[in-house]
Amino acid sequence: MASSALICDTEQWKGLQAHVGEIQKTHLRHLMHDVERCKAMTAEYEGIYLDYSRQRATGETMEKLFKLAEAAKLKEKIEKMFRGDKINSTENRSVLHVALRAPRDEVINSNRVNVVPEVWGVKDKIKQFSETFRSGSWVGATGKALTNVVSVGIGGSFLGPLFVHAALQTDPEAAESAKGRQLRFLANVDPVDVARSIKDLDPETTLVVVVSKTFTTAETMLNARTLKEWIVSSLGPDAVAKHMIAVSTNLELVEKFGIDPKNAFAFWDWVGGRYSVCSAVGVLPLSLQYGFPIVQKFLEGAASIDKHFRSSSFEKNIPVLLGLLSVWNVSFLGYPARAILPYSQALEKFAPHIQQLSMESNGKGVSIDGVQLPFESGEIDFGEPGTNGQHSFYQLIHQGRVIPCDFIGVVKSQQPVYLKGEIVSNHDELMSNFFAQPDALAYGKTPEQLHSEKVPEHLIPHKTFQGNRPSLSLLLPSLSAYEIGQLLAIYEHRIAVQGFLWGINSFDQWGVELGKSLASQVRKSLHASRVEGKPVLGFNSSTTSLLTRYLA
Ligand code: F6P
């Protein structure tokens, strides 16, 4: 396939399109009878078990998808990423989040320079700083040790760290090492979020970490100035040196803001915002809360999946299989959405993180060469932990629209509870639903079954479940820092695989720019009206009326 050609013009894409008709004739109820098929549609790595037998796919589908991967040069593209080639071509950047978790002795080049020593330089600095901070030797302006951290950042500078924090805080080992400390996040520029983030905190014992790749994001900078004022008004201007630190690629702007460069932690333009949780963006606040050794385990988990992704054959490669199946569901079966359903409350912030990771990466209209795509890329991600989701939106998934589901379960709970007299433990109760839901979706319930249960005739249509609704099950052995890192990397690579197959650039995000520049015009107009009493000018009639009403 020529580099500028579109994947949808290949024989392999057309072969899959033709194959859809075959699949439409099948029902998961029948496909699930084939024991050999079910056994074949599994993969395992370090105890992580993937079962994709409830996808609307057969061995033939998988063969065709592997051929599509060949046509898309998937292997070469993965290799280019790990090699540090500038695959983010619209920004002329390498894509090297894998270097953030690479072992110390690995060599990964960007611009012919091995970046691994630099990465470890920052990690060593974080380790040292977090030890000083946690030991109480780092004291604030009034001589008190700091026990509270507010991490100010948005998008990729917020969602990944929040997901990991939420997952770690219920882990007994991590919770023990976080005793007496608080980590909070401030993302939204909404003053309500500012108030919530500092509620009941004393500036005397609080450290603010400003996290921004660019150090120009309007919301983050206003929030950073707001918390700076909170500190200065209570402790005086010199307090900034002890109460504010930063994470950024733009150390010049960090200094201009008034944060001592010694207290700034760098990362690099080859780390995309939404791929940055393994950089100082996540590693610093999480190390302050939990200690560096626990965060290092999280990084090692992610690194183990990097190895698996780079070296395993596609047939047994979990991120590749997931990526191929997503492309199959979106581009061939026509299912545009995906539900992310962790049966683990600890993963409550996983779906919000994947929303950004996936939709900012793959929601594109043109190929990497700028050619308009004649098909839709990207996937609409949403989700909620089970069983909560079952009592919320599962009705639609069972009897309304078809939405492929990712069921994520954990064998060993972080918090085992077994109430005397109950027939199962709380975790078994949770997992009973994890095992039941995929079959309910796949098999459904027929009118014949309902008749045999003597369901009144008028209720038969309402109680019928058509079934044939695809899902996959991902079972993790436990949910320690290591597995949290593995889960993160599985999804990061899956999303990259989707982008590689669609032939798009999953690593830029031009789509967020237009809204930002229009907001800047509105900001200027609000200022001119409020401060100089000028009328609202330069907007269409709808926006003018809305603004006038707001200002009045
Ligand atoms: O929303 C656009 C975006 O650029 C994201 O990609 C990024 O994660 C977020 O804004 C925050 O950017 P920064 O870390 O530069 O403040």
Image (spheres, grey):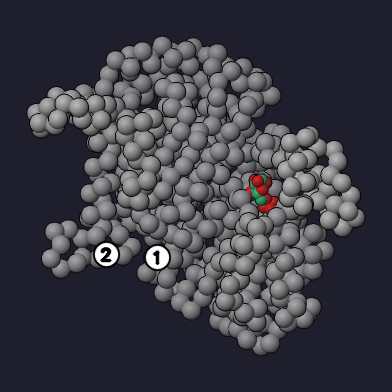
Amino acid type at image mark 1: Thr
What is the x, y in percent for residue 336? 47, 29
Q: What element carries label 1?
A: loop
Q: Quadrant of the N terminus?
A: top right
Q: Report crowding for label 1: few under 14, some 14 to 19, many 20 or more residues within 10 A (C-alpha).
A: some
User: Which residue is pictured at 54% across the width and 65% down the height?
Assistant: 286
Q: Mark 1 points at which residue?
A: 170
Left or right placement of residue 49 versus residue 314 in this view: left
- Farthest bottom residue in view: 143
Q: What element carries label 2?
A: loop
User: Which residue is pictured at 36% across the width and 21% down the height?
Assistant: 61
User: Which residue is pictured at 61% across the width and 62% down the height?
Assistant: 193
Comparing 30 with 219, the one in front is: 219
Specify whether tag 2 is near ligand 1 (CB below 8 Å): no
What is the x, y in percent for residue 440? 25, 36
Residue 118: quarter of image: bottom right
| Position above or below: 233 against 380 | below
User: Which residue is pictured at 55% across the width and 24% down the height?
Assistant: 376
Comparing 275 with 114, the one in front is: 275
Amino acid type at image mark 2: Pro
Left or right placement of residue 159 versus residue 471 in this view: right
| Position above or below: 17 against 485 | above
| Position above or below: 457 against 130 | above
Measure how far apart labels 1 and 2 are at the Cα level.
11 Å
Comparing 392 with 530, the one in front is: 530
What is the x, y in percent for residue 502? 55, 26
Left or right placement of residue 112 versus residue 16 in this view: right
Q: Mark 2 points at which residue?
A: 416
Comparing 227 with 370, the one in front is: 227
Left or right placement of residue 4 versus residue 332 in this view: right
Marked residue nearer the N-terminal end (1 or 2): 1
Can the viewer see residue 207? yes
